[in-house]
Amino acid sequence: MPFSAYRDNFDAETLAILEAAFNEAWEVVTASGGDFDQETTRNALAELIISFAAEGETNPKRLKELALAALPQTLGTP
C-alpha cells in the first residue's frame, strides 16, 4: 500500500479513500497504454493524492481527477 507510511497523518477511513483513489487513477494510467516508468509514475501519483488530501480533499473521485490532471506536469511530460 503506497500510503502505509502516512498512518500517523491520516485516519484509517481517509487512508482507505486515498487507496481507492490511487487504484482507480492507476487503472486509468495503465489503460492509457503509454510507455512510462511504472515506479516513478506510481510514486508521483501517490504523492499527488497525498498532497491534495493534505489540502483537505477527501472525495475519492475528485482526488483521482486532480491527481490525473497534475500527473503530466509532475512527470515533466506534455
Image (cartoon, grey):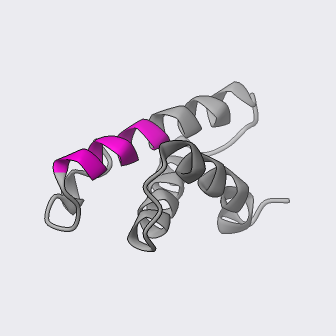
Q: Residue at x 65, y 49 (%)?
A: 65
Q: Quadrant of residue 47?
A: bottom left
Front residue (pair 5, 59): 59
> Is 66 on the left or on the right of 50, as rendered?
right
Q: Which residue corresponds to the image point at 42% horizontal and 63% vertical from the top-left?
A: 53
Q: Position of residue 68 (x, y in %)?
A: 66, 50
Q: Residue 55: percent from the left, percent from the top?
A: 45, 74
- Magenta span contains residue 61: no
What segment is highlighted magenta in the picture?
12-21
For image coordinates 78% across by 60% down, the residue present is 77
In depth, the one of 13 and 9 nearer the eye is 13
The quadrant the C terminus occupies is bottom right
Q: Is residue 54 above or below residue 40?
A: below
What's the residue at 58%, 29% (across, down)? 27
Q: Is residue 32 above or below residue 22?
A: above
Q: Nearer the viewer, residue 36 or 74?
A: 74
**Residue 52 shown left or right of residue 62 in the figure:** left
